[in-house]
Image (cartoon, rainbow, N blue to C red):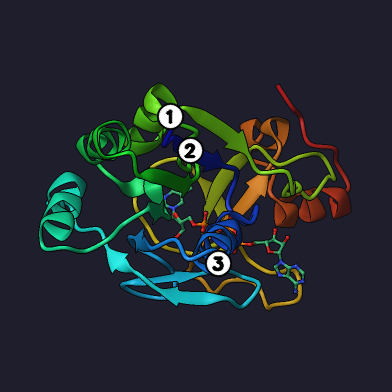
Amino acid sequence: MAELHFFTGTMDSGKSTLALQTNHNHAARGRVGRIFTTHDRAGAATVSSRLGLTHEALEVESDFNFWSYVVDTLTRGGRIDYLICDEAQFYAPDQIDQLAKVVDELQIDVFAFGILTDFRSILFPGSARLVELADRMNVLQVEALCWCGKRATHNARTENGAMVVEGEVIVVGDVDQADEPSAGPQDVAYEVLCRQHFRRRLTADRAKAVSLAPEPLPFG
Ligand SMILES: Nc1ncnc2c1ncn2[C@@H]1O[C@H](COP(=O)(O)OP(=O)(O)O)[C@@H](O)[C@H]1O
Ligand SMILES: Cc1cn([C@H]2C[C@H](O)[C@@H](COP(=O)(O)O)O2)c(=O)[nH]c1=O
């Protein structure tokens, strides 16, 4: 039986790597798939992993219809055994419904990968629909860590180095790497945090500044 799988985790937890590994393993056994993504950091029509793997993909525009695409392909004699869907948090809920229909009516496996919540800690509509419809939901086993060492559960956004909770929902960006110079004044970056430090808006930079300050921070 085909299934709709949803693999989720914070940013930087290995989702795109797993997406490309999943494609590799299925393709190696002669199965024929299609790889989809949208708004990847590496640019349009590309799935990129921080481990250095990249693969060309089909870009999912807002009016793209998975059901029509698959039916058209099969009607023209094409073969599709599975779909890999990266950055699925950005897909519209209707597109997730189309993916579920592809699984049920055409017996094609769908492997979707995406983050659950945005920088405000609110579910992305596409991810919410995946939670509602997926046959299996898997949380990535390689845990991204907060600066304090606890498991990171939230994706914080920083602007001018400070965590923000207002703004556009979709802003493509990356987590700052520890060995890279910190973001410039206009840069938007992301940082994964545990819930406590997300609630307190305590990013690594701010924690460092606070620990150097003479007065302790008055937490409410
Ligand atoms: N230099 C490295 N050596 C080993 N692992 C790395 C390195 N850089 C990144 N990674 C791994 O890659 C993961 C991020 O993979 P990626 O597929 O890009 O994540 P996601 O798609 O979830 O944002 C990191 O959590 C880390 O485990
Ligand atoms: C939290 C959050 C993230 N994004 C963007 C930032 C990245 O481009 C992707 C996530 O990619 P990853 O492969 O999981 O690292 O999503 C966004 O647009 N809005 C947000 O709130």
In this view of the protein, which residue sits in the foreground, 201 or 140?
Answer: 140
Q: Which residue is mark 3?
A: 24
| Count of labels in the image | 3
Residue pictured at 25% horizontal, 58% vertical: 60
SS for tag 3? helix
Q: Are marks 2 and 1 in contact (CB under 8 Å)?
A: yes
Does residue 167 appear in this view?
no
SS for tag 1? loop
Q: Nearer the viewer, mark 1 or mark 3?
A: 3
In this view of the protein, which residue sits in the foreground, 211 or 213?
Answer: 211
Reply above or below: 102 against 174: above
Ranked by sequence position, the earlier of labels 2 and 3 is 2
Residue 178 locus on image (x, y percent): 75, 69
Q: Nearer the viewer, mark 2 or mark 3?
A: 3
Q: Which residue is mark 1?
A: 134
Q: Which residue is mark 2?
A: 5
Real-space CA distance between mark 1 and mark 3, rounded to the nearest whole angstrom: 22 Å
10 Å crowding of disc 1: few (<14), some (14-19), many (20+): many
Real-space CA distance between mark 2 and mark 1, rounded to the nearest whole angstrom: 6 Å
Tell whether circle 3 marks a residue whose Cβ is less than 8 angstroms from ligand 1.
Answer: no
Reply above or below: 171 against 214: below
Q: Are marks 1 and 3 in contact (CB under 8 Å)?
A: no
In this view of the protein, which residue sits in the foreground, 56 or 209?
Answer: 56
Ranked by sequence position, the earlier of labels 2 and 1 is 2
In this view of the protein, which residue sits in the foreground, 191 or 40?
Answer: 40
**Quarter where residue 14 is shown:** bottom right
Does residue 209 appear in this view?
yes
Q: What is the quadrant of the N terminus in the image?
A: top left
Query: What amino acid is at disc 2?
Result: His
Residue 24 locus on image (x, y percent): 55, 67
Ranked by sequence position, the earlier of labels 1 and 3 is 3
Residue 76 locus on image (x, y percent): 11, 63
